[in-house]
Image (cartoon, rainbow, N blue to C red):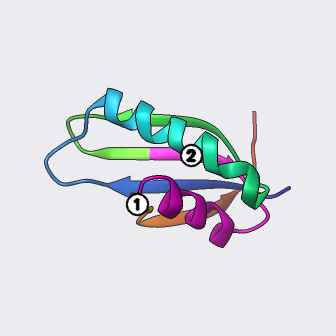
Amino acid sequence: MPLFMDVHHLDGGVALGDVANAHKADLEKQGAHDVSYLRYWVDEGQGKIFCLVEAPSADAAHTVHRQAHGLVADAIYQVQEGS
């Protein structure tokens, strides 16, 4: 399954707790789209959120965010994990 990293840019910063709640909503919706949101990272002061997701396509990952909470990514990149 392809691996994607998405990036969100929110003006004015973002609270870690709000991102945690959005992630929970993703987990509730992801199964219907064969998507698995794995991890996320947050820069609260800069309003940056990064989500790592396994999905059949970037479109499927986008759909889960849209349906779960409406906070769609500004960019989605297909990535490969390295060590």
Asked whether, in this view, residue 9 is left or right of residue 46, the answer is right
Residue in view at x 79 percent, y 56 percent? 34
Of 76 and 72, the residue lying toward us: 72
Residue in view at x 13 percent, y 47 percent? 12
Residues marked 1 and 2 touching at CB (< 8 Å): no
* Magenta region includes residue 8: no
Could you tell me which quadrant the C terminus lies in? top right
Circle 1 SS class: loop
* Magenta region includes residue 67: yes
**Extreme right residue here?**
1
Circle 2 SS class: helix
On screen, residue 35 above or below 46: below
Disc marking residue 2: none
Query: Which amino acid type is shown beneath numbered disc 1?
Result: Gly
Query: Which amino acid type is shown beneath numbered disc 2?
Result: Asp
Residue 47 placement (x, y as % from top left):
26, 45
Give the extent of the magenta segment.
Answer: 50-69
Q: How many dots with numbers?
A: 2
| Residue where numbered disc 2 is placed | 26
Asked whether, in this view, residue 61 is left or right of residue 25, the answer is right
Q: Quadrant of residue 59?
A: bottom right
| Residue where numbered disc 1 is placed | 70
Mark 1 vs 2, N-terminal side: 2
Q: Quadrant of residue 62?
A: bottom right
Of 16 and 27, the residue lying toward us: 27
